[in-house]
Image: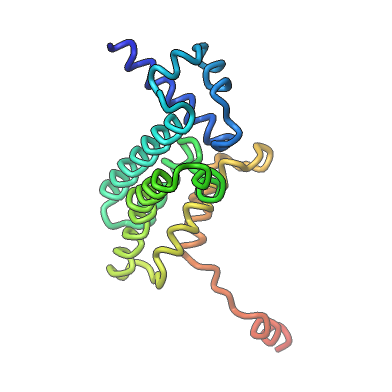
Amino acid sequence: MKKESLSQDRMLQVAEVLFAERGYAAVTLRDITNTLGLTHAALYYHFPGGKEELFIVVTRHSILQHGQALAEVIEAACCDIRLQLYGMAEWFLSQPPLDFIRMSQSDMPVLKPEDARRLMELMQEQVLLRIQFALHDADEGGFIHCENPALVGSALIGMIESFHSMPDFAVRNSRTDMAKEMIDIVLRGLEYRGFERKNTQEES
């Protein structure tokens, strides 16, 4: 039984990487079995529902793992939103990308509606709301001014995860360092002065 459990864990790890890289539609069971060196029968032993069941189990496991990690990061950094966001960046960039846009536009529509709804609700609960509440608490504490924590939180996740796809030649130091630099810019704000105001100042 222990051997089967370890084998299933390995299947989840491999499937998570493949689904993260290509998306649900582009990954075949043959891709997974070839990578693992298994037969289709062995894979169906663990996942009788085939690729769809495997994707649901993998995605649910990944979301719960992200939720637990984000909760620990938020708690460890106490009320320092900067350190909380740094920790989130380190976590997201140490894992296969979640790719919210592809998940919602490409992966979820091919699943049964009820399964898709449950996964998206879990994503909202475990990931999006954790970041939203961290920003809200920082705003309430007077550490930042954030009128729309939901919008800012979603944007931050998207920006952080975009560093996964950045080509190596464009990376300075590390993707995590660049993500932290981006977080600092967001926290400071770009202090937009307005086009007309800038031109007036230059002319004077």
The residue shown at (50%, 15%) is: 40
Q: Quadrant of the N terminus?
A: top left
Residue 169 seen in this snapshot: yes
Residue 87 shows up from this direction: no
Kindly identify the residue that appears in the image at 53 percent across and 22 percent down: 32
- Asked if 92 appears above or below 83 in the picture, the reply is above
Instruction: From the viewer's perspective, tell me whether residue 146 is left or right of residue 179.
Output: left
Residue 89: percent from left, percent from top: 45, 46
Position of 6 relative to 49 (above/below): above
Q: Position of residue 143 (x, y in %)?
A: 33, 67
**Residue at position x 57%, y 30% in the image:** 27
> In the image, is 21 to the left or to the right of 78?
right
| Image position, residue 172 (x, y; %) | 61, 42
> In this rendering, would 19 be left or right of 146?
right
Kindly give the residue lying farthest to the right in the view shown.
203
Q: Nearer the viewer, residue 49 or 58?
A: 49
Protein image colouring: rainbow
Q: Position of residue 103 (x, y in %)?
A: 51, 46
Residue nearest the observer in this picture, 131 or 171: 131
Image quarter in which the C terminus is found: bottom right
